Image (cartoon, grey):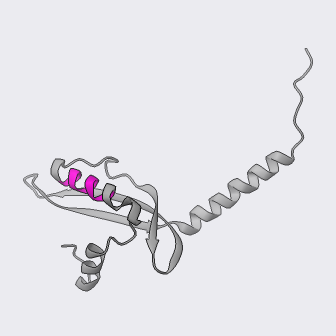
């Protein structure tokens, strides 16, 4: 069970696949089970950008990291995950990429210098 200041929130998070889109849930839980059994995660605890779901936002992008937790003797005792909402940052970067593409299209093509 996740420990949090509000155990009711922890129960809700654990029981409702918070932020995991339905089409990704089977893959998510397969990878979770594999990590808990083996003690190894695909990304080694590094964050990765992924889409998520939340009832208050139509689009949600999160930096998500996951790690296996071991006790002092090395036995796996659980897992920890961290998800940070990076939707605003993602959307700003997307807009900047689009603006850069537009600017590059407007530039006249440079001719290769004559030899």
User: Closer to the camera, 45 or 62?
Assistant: 62
Q: Position of residue 55 (x, y in %)?
A: 46, 79
Residue at 89% x, 28% y is 111
Can you say whether 2 is above or below 33 in the image?
Answer: below
Task: Give 25 or 3, whichever is nearer the viewer.
Answer: 25
Residue at 87% from the left image edge and 24% from the top image edge: 112
The image quadrant that residue 47 belongs to is: bottom left
**Residue 107 in the figure: left or right of residue 48:** right
Question: Residue 38 magenta-drawn?
Answer: no
Q: Quadrant of the C terminus?
A: top right
Residue nearer the viewer, 26 or 95: 26
Check if residue 34 falls in the magenta segment.
yes
Q: At 9% across and 54% down in the image, what residue appears? A: 75
Q: Main secondary structure of the magenta part?
A: helix
Task: Give the left or right position of residue 98, taking residue 74 as reference.
Answer: right
Q: Which residues are magenta?
A: 28-36
Percent from the top left, x then y, of residue 85? Answer: 47, 69
Left or right, residue 97 beside residue 77 = right
What residue sits 25% from the left and 85% below the top?
8
Quarter-of-image position of residue 84: bottom left
- Residue 41 image point, x, y percent: 28, 49
């Amino acid at each position: 069970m996740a420990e949090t200041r509000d155990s009711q929130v922890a129960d809700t998070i654990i029981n409702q696949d918070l932020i995991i889109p339905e089409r990704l849930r089977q893959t998510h839980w397969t990878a979770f089970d594999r990590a808990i059994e083996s003690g190894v995660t695909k990304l080694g605890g590094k964050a990765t950008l992924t889409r998520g779901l939340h009832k208050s936002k139509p689009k949600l992008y999160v930096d998500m990291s996951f790690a296996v937790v071991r006790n002092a003797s090395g036995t796996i005792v659980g897992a920890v995950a961290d998800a940070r909402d990076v939707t605003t940052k993602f959307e700003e970067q997307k807009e900047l990429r689009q603006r850069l593409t537009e600017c590059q299209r407007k530039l006249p093509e440079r001719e290769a210098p004559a030899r």
